[in-house]
Amino acid sequence: MDQLNDYADNRLVRGCVYCVGMAETRDHVPSKCLLDSPYPTNLPVVGCCDACNQNFSKDEEYFVCLLESVLCGSTDPKKIRRPSVAKIMEKSPALRQRIENSRTEINGQFGFIPEVDRIDNVMLKLARGHAAFELSQCCRTEPDHFWCGPLPSLPQEAQDTFNSVHFQQMFGEVGSRNLQRLFVTQLTMPSGNGEQQNIGMLINDWIDVQDDQYRYIAIDDMGFLIIRIVISEYFACEVAWGV
Ligand SMILES: [Zn+2]
């Protein structure tokens, strides 16, 4: 990934970005368990306390194992696509069994009943990490909007909206990495008198952390912070805070 420095006011993001604790360690956003080796260089890191770091790691393991079980239709490590996740499931028979026990069949379709609280915990943590790193904003409060689920479960139009780039209306935090990533493009549009005119637009695009594995977009515009995430081109999440 591009290595960008945060030039925003350094009082904005201090301590653990997930709670009010001290920053005792650094946390990768996204966590490496969500990515495959070889890992991208310059992965984003944020300050994190030891307690948050440990609390999240069990839920993250559960999430990656569940997601792979869904995508592969099995909890058998031999059938799991990602080697690092197959290894977790081999080493943690209790976790594998827990996911296997949640297997269900509805109208002939196999699926798994997710532990929603644990998945929400992981997605909210990722969104808070991206907001801190990209937007220089600490979002420790509960979000005003939260959705996560399979991207293909959305109607096509909603998927297109979700996947679209963002046309920036107002600048976010001065000096933030997000502001440094914005780029200008020229759009040709008809004006009121029917003639074509060129309009400069500021584009905020998705950031591909790892192809087909993890991408996100972080938006700070018109008083709203929005984070969208797509994992394995299947599981998606949208979190927003009105500030
Ligand atoms: Zn913490």
Image (cartoon, grey):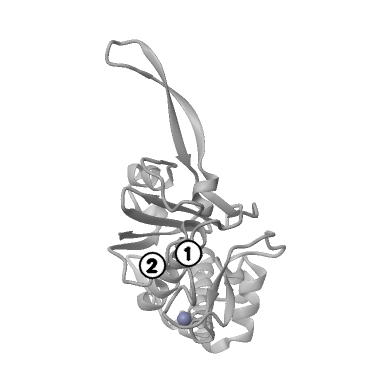
Residue 142 placement, left or right of 53: left
Q: Position of residue 205 (x, y in %)?
A: 49, 44
- What residue sits 49% from the left and 48% below the top? 179
What residue does disc 1 label? 132
Q: Nearer the viewer, residue 118 or 112?
A: 118
138 is higher (above) or lower (below) than 103: above
Q: Is mark 1 within 8 Å of ligand 1?
A: no
Residue 142 placement, left or right of 47: left
What residue does disc 2 label? 139
Q: Position of residue 73 (x, y in %)?
A: 50, 67
Q: Amino acid at mark 2?
A: Cys
**Is label 2 in a helix, a strand or a loop?**
loop
Q: Amino acid at mark 1?
A: Ala
Q: Nearer the viewer, residue 70 or 158?
A: 158
Q: Residue 171 lies in what quarter of the image?
A: top left
* Quarter the C terminus occupies: bottom left
Q: How far apart are the alpha carbons under marks 1 and 2?
A: 7 Å
- What residue sits 43% from the left and 68% below the top? 123
- What residue sits 30% from the left and 11% below the top? 194
